[in-house]
């Protein structure tokens, strides 16, 4: 296709989700088309000439002119041609954000100092007794036992209020902790942290090969899902889950739809069980996301998305991709169970068929893992989403043969009702309940 001025990047979604790279080249009328997952995972910088195909999702990304767009829209093998729009993290920058980065270091230093002091006192007492027995000025004495050293007691894992609120510890008591379940966090990446175990990952941000997080958002979401159950810091909903970092947003917190589709294709190719997406835009449902989520669902992958932080704006309803049928759209509530003022909700913004709020979870003042081996408080539907992703992990462990549709229904049927009785446009089916969902 010849290029001209005023061209843009687009996503072409095909009628057949199994459209191959070669078939896509034929439909697009080009010869040079590349596999999006393998090429975008390198340090290659994307140019306007690059055409990527996302195998298994039935979609391609390329630069088109307005005339080329119209031609493709009239092709019977093409379902939709949509702009490759930008998505953003769904974190609220409000005054509740408080850095707690020194918490773990202070605990560790205090523990080490206490042991050192105890050893020093024991050594001094033993030395004094030895010197007394060796002195000729005093008669021999009967040896005595050294002073009893109290046993070292490892403090129990602090359980954050939000983890108790979704009743995750009750599922743990029955051995349901996420063991063997793979969850992909499509976000800004995940940073190394003593409270996290990262099983693998990839970056689809152009020119960036590391999945390391330079923002903190992805690391925070990862901690809500699967921070380890140890004696420090925080603990996630599914502390034994296998975490995978899929960097689809830059360290600035934004990324193109094509980057995110590459991450979704990677999740399918690498056998993930759950995908957590705390990202979005205030827009109606996208055919590309709707088809991609349906494809992942058909492959056995449950997709959980943040509903959005746009309530009170010109687009107060659930944003994309959470409004795609097949996604679990998650709204945010505070510790008292009241909907967060920013949490997107309601119906009527988009044509019939848009996915409304499915469930809610804690999303105000959530303490979790951040950069620098620390902890910090964040708010947003971005924080609510990983609670439900973690719950989906627990349900998948408990019921390994459940399909994504069955997991969704199980979470909805066992939620704690909030707001108006039954399913309502503000709270959906209510607060996710890990205890009842895993019975």
Image (cartoon, rainbow, N blue to C red):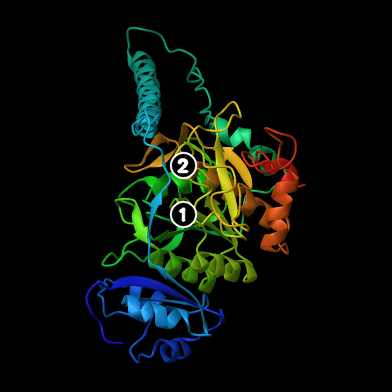
Look at 31% across and 56% down and name the residue there.
250
Image coordinates of residue 430 in percent, x first then y, are 67, 39
Image coordinates of residue 180 in percent, x first then y, are 61, 60
Residue reaching furthest to the left: 5
Q: Which residue is mark 1?
A: 283
Q: Nearer the viewer, residue 134 or 72?
A: 72
* Mark 2 → mark 1, Cα distance in angstroms: 12 Å
Tell me if I can see residue 318 in this picture.
yes
Image coordinates of residue 70 in percent, x first then y, are 40, 78
Number of the label disc, if any, that sits on residue 71: none
Relative vertical location of residue 95 with respect to residue 361 in this rendering, above or below: above
Image coordinates of residue 4 in percent, x first then y, are 23, 79
Of badges 2 and 1, nearer the viewer stands 1
Q: Which residue is mark 2?
A: 309
Look at 45% across and 67% down and name the residue there.
261
Q: Nearer the viewer, residue 331 or 171?
A: 331
SS of the residue at dot 2?
A: loop
Residue reaching furthest to the right: 439
Residue 297, located in which quarter of the rendered image? bottom right
Tell me if I can see residue 238 in this picture.
no
Relative vertical location of residue 160 with respect to residue 248 in this rendering, above or below: above
SS of the residue at dot 1?
A: loop
Look at 35% across and 29% down and name the residue there.
106
């Amino acid at each position: 296709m010849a290029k001209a001025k005023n061209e843009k990047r687009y996503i072409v979604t095909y009628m057949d989700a199994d459209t191959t790279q070669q078939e896509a080249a034929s439909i697009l009328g080009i010869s040079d088309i590349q596999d999006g997952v393998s090429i975008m995972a390198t340090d290659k910088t994307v140019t306007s000439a690059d055409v990527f195909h996302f195998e298994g999702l039935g979609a391609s990304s390329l630069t088109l002119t307005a005339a080329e767009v119209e031609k493709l829209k009239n092709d019977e093998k093409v379902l939709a041609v949509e702009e490759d729009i930008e998505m953003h993290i769904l974190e609220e920058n409000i005054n509740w954000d408080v850095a707690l980065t020194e918490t773990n270091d202070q605990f560790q230093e205090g523990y080490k100092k206490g042991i050192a002091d105890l050893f020093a006192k024991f050594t001094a007492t033993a030395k004094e007794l030895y010197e007394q027995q060796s002195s000729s000025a005093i008669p021999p004495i009967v040896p005595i036992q050294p002073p009893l050293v109290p046993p070292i007691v490892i403090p129990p894992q602090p359980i954050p209020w939000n983890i108790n609120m979704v009743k995750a510890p009750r599922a743990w008591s029955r051995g349901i902790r996420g063991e063997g379940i793979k969850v992909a966090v499509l976000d800004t990446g995940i940073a190394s942290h003593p409270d996290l175990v990262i099983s693998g990952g990839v970056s689809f941000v152009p020119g960036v090969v590391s999945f390391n997080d330079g923002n903190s958002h992805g690391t925070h979401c990862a901690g809500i899902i699967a921070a380890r159950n140890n004696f420090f810091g925080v603990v996630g909903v599914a502390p034994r889950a296998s975490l995978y970092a899929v960097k689809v947003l830059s360290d600035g917190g934004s990324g193109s739809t094509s980057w995110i589709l590459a991450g979704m294709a990677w999740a399918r190719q690498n056998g993930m069980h759950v995908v957590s997406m705390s990202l979005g835009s205030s827009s109606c449902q996208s055919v590309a996301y709707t088809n991609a989520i349906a494809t992942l669902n058909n492959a056995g992958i449950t997709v959980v998305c943040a509903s959005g932080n746009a309530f009170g704006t010109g687009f107060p309803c659930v944003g994309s991709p959470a409004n795609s049928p097949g996604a679990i759209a998650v709204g945010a509530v505070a510790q008292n169970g009241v909907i967060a003022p920013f949490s997107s909700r309601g119906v009527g913004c988009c044509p019939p068929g848009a996915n409304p709020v499915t469930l809610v979870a804690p999303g105000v003042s959530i303490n979790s893992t951040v950069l620098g081996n620390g902890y910090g408080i964040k708010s947003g539907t971005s924080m609510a989403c990983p609670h439900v992703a973690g719950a989906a992990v627990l349900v998948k462990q408990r019921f390994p043969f459940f399909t994504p549709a069955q997991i969704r229904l199980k979470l909805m049927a066992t939620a704690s009702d909030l707001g108006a009785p039954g399913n309502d446009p503000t709270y959906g089916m209510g607060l996710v309940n890990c205890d009842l969902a895993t019975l």
